[in-house]
Amino acid sequence: MGDFSSSIKKYLSISGGTSVYGTDKGRWADQKYLDRWPGITNSIAVTENKGINTGSWNIRKGHVVQEKKGNWYFEGHPLVCYHFSGFELISEGEAELCNRKTLPAHAEKIYTAYLRAIEKVIRQIKAVDAGSIPRMLRDREPLQLRNYRRLRE
């Protein structure tokens, strides 16, 4: 535990304790610090598993996420988690899939599966508290509409 605590202190000294967008000081959305963690502590390892935290940046480079018999794969590796970076729920029936870049056509299948899961969660939330969904939505216009989709009604 001591190693983890000192690692957190080291991170705070590197990051200034903030989450900021910008390339100053080697940070981008407060994630570049991760590049240094293997040198800060021996409690963290870099995985070679390509199925962990792949996202739109990989798909835009031509890599494919595939579904086979109910399981998802990235480059032949089981998909552990997919980072739906830039996803915005605009309203109960509308979403922006990725507000950073236009997604290629081969991204459609995984984003459609994600939208179906979001629809299910919205129904579950509304069953418990019908007024909660509007409170969760952004109170301003989406940053950019590049991959707009309507959810099924």
Image (cartoon, grey):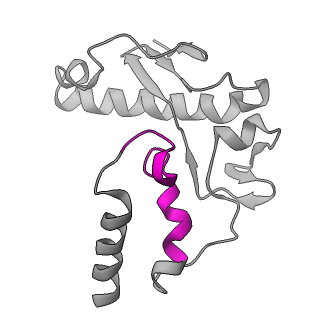
Q: Is residue 64 left or right of residue 113?
A: right
**What's drawn in magenta, residue-wise?**
20-38
* In the image: residue 69, left or right of residue 44: right
- Membership of 123 in magenta stretch: no
The quadrant of the image that shows the N terminus is bottom left
Q: Is residue 38 above or below residue 118?
A: below
Q: Is residue 36 magenta?
A: yes
Q: How many badges with numbers are in the image?
A: 0
Whether residue 1 appears in this view of the structure is: no
Which quarter of the picture shows residue 91? top left
Q: Residue 126, how many percent across, how many down? A: 25, 25
Apparent side of residue 74 relative to residue 114 in the rendered image (left or right): right
* Residue 56, image quadrant: top right
Image quadrant in which the C terminus is located: top left
Tell me the residue at 47%/52% (across/down): 25
Please tell me in which quadrant of the rendered image residue 2 appears: bottom left
On the image, the x and y values in percent for residue 139 come to: 26, 15
